Image (cartoon, grey):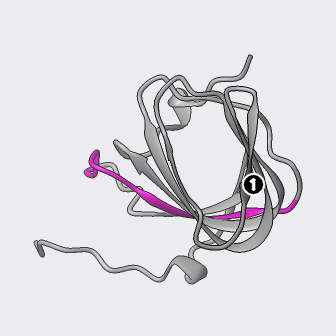
Amino acid sequence: MANYIITQLDEIEPVRCPCGFASRAFAASDNSVATMHLVDIQQDSRTHYHKRITELYLVLEGEGQIELDGQLFPLKPMTAIFIKPGCRHRAIGKLKLINVPIPAFDETDEWFD
């Protein structure tokens, strides 16, 4: 087995998520370290949080805002955000971003108030 994995994010079939649509790379049952998502936010996303997952966001396209624990911050290309577990968050606007969940994304760790 190789010590690396290569994927083409823009060729992964997107799935619906609270933020819009996400193409999730490295989401294999034998990987618990981290995943990488190409997220297409087509309108305001739904406020949510994670109890275990830390997320790193990197805005690639678009402008808008991110709401972190009720406070709004502007977003534009190359804005990077570090979101700790427990932080209620959502993106606002039409955006494309990279999301790196650490540890690997787990659908059971998405929580809504």
Quadrant of the image occupied by residue 15: bottom right
* Residue at the farthest top position: 113
Q: Quadrant of the N terminus?
A: bottom left
- The residue that appears at 47% across and 38% down in the rendered structure is 106
Image position of 12 (left or right of 27): right
28 within the magenta span:
no
Image position of 60 (left or right of 102): right
Residue 27 image point, x, y percent: 41, 56
Q: Nearer the viewer, residue 7 or 79?
A: 79
Residue 67 image point, x, y percent: 74, 39
Residue 93 image point, x, y percent: 86, 58
Q: Nearer the viewer, residue 57 or 2?
A: 57
Q: For the residue marked with disc 1, what is the amino acid?
A: Pro
Image position of 56 (left or right of 30): right
Q: Nearer the viewer, residue 14 or 84?
A: 84
- The residue that appears at 67% across and 26% down in the rendered structure is 69
Measured along the vertical axis of the image, is residue 8 above or below residue 90?
A: below
- Give the number of marks: 1
Magenta region, residue range: 30-42
Residue 2 image point, x, y percent: 12, 75
Q: Which residue is mark 1?
A: 74
- The residue that appears at 80% across and 67% down in the rendered structure is 63
Measured along the vertical axis of the image, is residue 58 above or below residue 67?
A: below
Task: Rate crowding at label 1 as few (under 14), some (14 to 19) or many (20 or more) other CA atoms within 10 Å.
Answer: few
Measured along the vertical axis of the image, is residue 7 above or below residue 96?
A: below
- The residue that appears at 78% across and 52% down in the rendered structure is 65
Q: Secondary structure at mark 1?
A: strand
Image position of 96 (left or right of 1): right
Quadrant of the image occupied by residue 97: bottom right
Q: Quadrant of the C terminus?
A: top right
